[in-house]
Image (cartoon, rainbow, N blue to C red):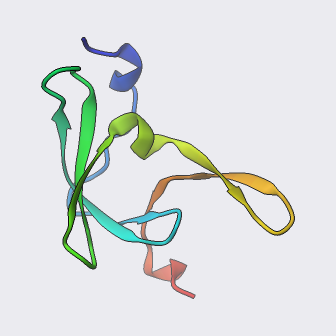
Amino acid sequence: MKNNQEENLAHPIPGIIYQHYKSGLYEPIYVATHTTTGEKMVIYKSHTEGTIYARPLKEWNDEVEVNTNKEVIKVVRFKIFSADDIK
């Protein structure tokens, strides 16, 4: 049950730290395939807690709406973390 749209999605890079839009830091371990659905899943861990998570690749690459004080904006769910992001 391979999804052709999934083929075009960017895969996160193992060993690179990503920042979640809510500020947590995560490291992808690998992209796995769900045994029943064939959906690509990102297996990743919390950089601070070490907890392991799985999230559909499509969600990893999604944009989410964030309500600021002035407006609702779209941001990427995960972006590559840069030390320049520390304020």
Q: Residue 70 appears at what percent x and percent y?
A: 87, 65
Q: Residue at x 40, y 45 (%)?
A: 60
Q: Residue at x 78, y 54 (%)?
A: 72
Q: Residue at x 39, y 26 (%)?
A: 8
Above or below for 65 versus 79? above
Q: Residue at x 59, y 48 (%)?
A: 64
Q: Residue 20 appears at what percent x and percent y?
A: 45, 63
Above or below for 61 versus 5? below
Q: In the image, 87: left or right of 1?
A: right
Q: In the image, 51: left or right of 78?
A: left
Residue 17: tell me if it is visible.
Answer: no
- Rendered-image quadrant of the C terminus: bottom right
Residue positioned most to the right: 70
Residue 28, quarter of the rendered image? bottom left
Above or below for 6 versus 65? above
Residue positioned most to the top: 1
Residue 66, quarter of the rendered image? bottom right
- Rendered-image quadrant of the N terminus: top left
